[in-house]
Image: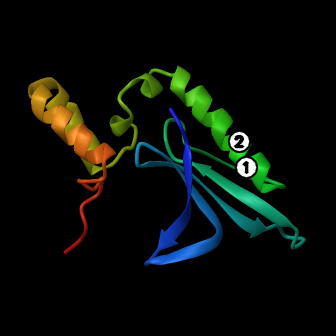
Amino acid sequence: MHITWKRTIIGGDELSHDFCAYVENIPIARIMRDHDVDHRILWSVNFHIGDAASDSCLIRREAIEWVEHRFAHFLTTEAGKRDPQEWPHDQRSAQLWFLRHDNPKQYAVLVEDLRNGRVERIARKT
């Protein structure tokens, strides 16, 4: 599985020095430039799947490697061996679990739609 990095977008604006890591359209981590108490530049890292974790790194490359290492470890766990569309703990997760057991054909369609971005993981508020 390949990690894709994209700039973080909030409210339609791309944030500088702020990136999200994705696998199959699923956000798995975020890194962003920050400052410590002595005003030195740090990179804050947040890993969103499995045993979620946070850390700080001195340089961006180190933050990226931290995410890659955590992701490689996650893939060796029981949760990491499931379909990637079941990794996040959001409103789609329960729906996917039930469909996988009750209606495998509909499950396969929903997973493909999620992978291709035709269906959102979290429905927009109206």
Q: Quadrant of residue 115?
A: top left
Which amino acid, mark 1? Ala
Give the percent coordinates (x, y) of residue 82.
37, 25
Residue type marked 2: Trp
Residue nearest the observer in this picture, 80 or 94: 80
Instruction: From the viewer's side, name the closer residue of 57 and 84.
Output: 84
Query: What residue is at 23 percent from the left and 45 percent from the top?
Result: 113
Q: Which residue is more in the foreground, 126 or 104?
A: 104
Q: Position of residue 104 (x, y in %)?
A: 14, 26
Residue 126 image point, x, y percent: 19, 75
Picture layout, residue 80 above or below residue 23: above
- Name the one closer to the observer, 25 or 88: 25
Identify the residue at image location x=25%, y=38%: 111
Q: Which residue is mark 2?
A: 66
Q: Is residue 29 visible?
A: yes
Q: Which mark is residue 40?
A: none
**How many residues crowd mark 2 within 10 Å: few (<14), some (14–19), many (20+)?**
some
**In the drawing, does residue 7 fall left or right of residue 69?**
left
Q: Secondary structure at mark 1?
A: helix
Q: CA distance from mark 2 to mark 1?
A: 5 Å
- Residue at the (23%, 71%) spot, across then down: 125
Image height of 9 relative to 48, above or below: below
Classify residue 7 as left or right of residue 85: right
User: Could you say which quadrant of the image residue 97 lies in?
Assistant: top left
Q: SS class of the residue under badge 2?
A: helix
Q: Quadrant of residue 112?
A: top left
Which residue is disc 1 drawn over? 63
Question: Circles 2 and 1: CB distance less than 8 Å?
Answer: yes
Q: Is residue 36 left or right of residue 25?
A: right
Say if residue 94 shows up in the picture. Answer: no
- For residue 36, above or below residue 85: below
